[in-house]
Amino acid sequence: MAHIDFLDETMRDGQQSLWGLRMRAGMALPVTPLIDRTGFSTIDLTGGGMLDVLTRYCQENYWEGLDLLVASMPNTPLRAGLRANANVTFGITPPALMDLWVQRLCAHGIRSFWIYDVLFGLDNMLRLAKVAKEANGAKVAGAIMFALSPVHTDEFFVSNAKKLADSPHVDSILLYDTAGVLEKERIQQLVPALVKAAGGKPIEFHSNNLLGLSAKAYLDAIDCGVSVIHTASRPMANGPSVPSTEIMAKNIQLRGHTHSLDESLFQPVADHFRAVAKASGNLYDQYAEYDEFSIQHQIPGGMMGTFKAQLAMHKMMDKLPEVLDEVAAVRRDLGYPGMATPFSQLVGIQAVLNVVTGKRYGTVPDEVIQYAAGFYGQTVAPVDAGVLDKIMAAPRAKEVLANPPEQPDLDELKKRYGTVDEDELIYRAFVPQPDIDKMRAAGPVRRDFPLLSSPELEDVRKLMQVATLPVVEMKSEGLNVSLRR
């Protein structure tokens, strides 16, 4: 029997999968002190996409909201996610800007990172891990992005895990299954090999519950040596999100394992997010049916809505099954990239274009050209030769190839964007100025979210009267944040 740590995904993967990254700080702040007291080993809180979405679509100041959230949870390490060679965009971000992004997150109180590269560009991953360690000694999880394909073998994953674990800057290995396709037989082969490769460093497991298999996969993985599982409060769990904290706390205890969570806090947190979801028109309390076809296309849950929107725009919703078939074909053509950002989007967009135009690779986005040219790193398997010829014959190919990603240093970036304020530099580098102006015109970040009165929230309010007292006024790491409304 084992002691299992829980990492909370309610405010990161949960809301990314169900709410499209549109969880504003005030939607969570009323219960973040409860989440902080629950006993999670880490709380996953933010990532690059939230900077973009919160600013452009919610007119909320990302840094201000982050400071409020960090100040409200002083007892639990807070985590940010990093794609090793890019932030926000589907293109390539200069290394100096990626390093600065890590440093600024550390300055704002982030104490944990998970770092990934779908093509396993380990040099970038390890560089950022070192930056995080040097900035504030942050814990770093090196991600093994799981995918099913002829080239994604156990040997492939274990070799990369060993290289990550050998670094003094990597503290744990994170097995990350975006499509939720890992089943018992593969887990029993792969996880013990990862445990051995990790050399005593913990193995974390994250599985999006698209097929309804992930709760069982967590139990099988724990049997094989996983000691950290990623879960979310029930309204923000399941479907394209991760399994619920509620069911996994119950499940592991039935198996004889232990945890450190205060289960009395589960319900008030769930009541709050369910009420916010209802008031804001967002998804909650999701579930998923097993769909064998998902194993072929491995589309992350959040992408399905995008597909439907694009096809509806062209009045071609009847083509959705054809698009899903084409996703599987494009992924095979492009050398089986793992279906996580940015490649899930690149494969998906190319598949939609192939179906909508009626000509395969007749229209090719710049990012697909960059991928085929190796700008993102070496592909896991070679791009199909005939398809590569079509991509390189695209009208934009010559210009794209003539302009590989630039690598300005920090001083050049400050001159380019006209500021020495590093938080402002991050904003100007990643978000269009008109969107920044609209965000600032909207005023300060709200510390709450308007809810309809409901009996189940009375217990939340009563708990919060006690829970918020120690953190009404707080100074932390140079921040002076008031949580008074």
Image: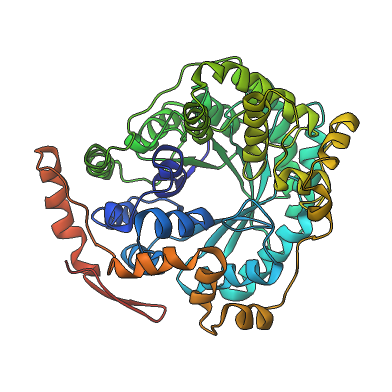
Q: Looking at the image, which is closer to me, 172 or 453? A: 453
- Residue 133, how many percent across, how many down? 63, 70
Who's the residue at 34% across and 34% down the image? 283
Q: Is residue 468 left or right of residue 150?
A: left
Q: Is residue 211 left or right of residue 393?
A: left
Give the image quarter of residue 394.
top right
Q: Is residue 71 left or right of residue 421?
A: left
Who's the residue at 84% across and 31% down the image? 387
**Colour scheme used in the picture?**
rainbow
Q: How many discs mark residues in the rendered view?
A: 0
Quadrant into which the C terminus falls: bottom left
Who's the residue at 58% across and 35% down the image? 178
Q: Looking at the image, which is closer to me, 218 or 353? A: 353
Give the image quarter of residue 183.
top right
- Residue 40, how many percent across, how many down? 41, 50
Who's the residue at 76% across and 51% down the image? 376
In this rendering, does residue 382 appear at all? Answer: no
- Residue 19, how many percent across, how many down? 39, 41
> Image height check: is 95 above or below 411?
above
Q: Give the residue furthest to the front.
A: 395
> Image height check: is 144 above or below 133?
above
In this rendering, does residue 446 appear at all? Answer: yes
Q: Looking at the image, which is closer to me, 228 or 120? A: 120
> Image height check: is 274 above or below 180?
below
Q: Looking at the image, which is closer to me, 406 or 357? A: 357
- Residue 260, how many percent across, how many down? 39, 47
